[in-house]
């Protein structure tokens, strides 16, 4: 019985710890004329907020997104 309680307690603690993590970086995309994309990255975890603005050609931005997705997929 004690082992069951310990297992349940450990499970609830790990699930609560995962919920506390917040997403630090948000990325917004705006389409511009002439096949360009304006990308705004905002980091909320630092004080003051860190904001990066970059302009990419659509094909270049899609290539960067594919690369990031591939890296995330390989990490799991």
Image: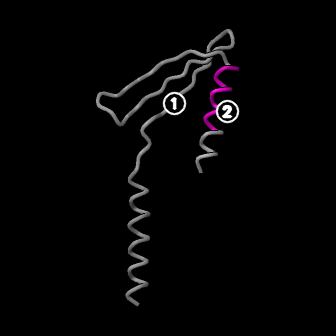
Identify the residue at horizontal 59%, vertical 51% (top origin). Answer: 76
Magenta residue check for 12: no
Quadrant of the image occupied by residue 58: top right
For the image, the number of numbered tags is 2
What is the span of residues highlighted in magenta in the rendered image? 59-69
Neighbour tally class for label 2: few under 14, some 14-19, many 20 plus, Cα within 10 Å: few
Along the polypeptide, which appears first: circle 2 or circle 1?
1
Residue 27 picture location, percent across and down: 51, 30
Quarter of the image for residue 1 reads: bottom left
Task: Identify the residue at image location x=41%, y=23%.
Answer: 51
| Relative height, residue 9 to residue 31 (above, below) | below
- Marks 1 and 2: in contact by CB < 8 Å? no
Disc 2 designates what residue? 66
Classify 61 as above or below 13. Answer: above
Residue 55 location (% of width, % of height): 56, 15
The image quarter containing residue 18 is bottom left
Q: Secondary structure at mark 1?
A: strand
For marks 2 and 1, give the CA distance.
15 Å
């Amino acid at each position: 019985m004690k082992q069951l309680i310990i297992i349940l307690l450990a499970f609830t603690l790990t699930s609560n710890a995962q919920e506390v993590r917040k997403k630090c970086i948000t990325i917004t995309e705006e389409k511009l004329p002439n096949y360009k994309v304006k990308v705004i990255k905002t980091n909320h975890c630092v004080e003051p907020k860190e904001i990066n603005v970059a302009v990419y050609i659509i094909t270049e931005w899609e290539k960067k997104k594919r690369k990031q997705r591939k890296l995330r997929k390989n990490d799991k």
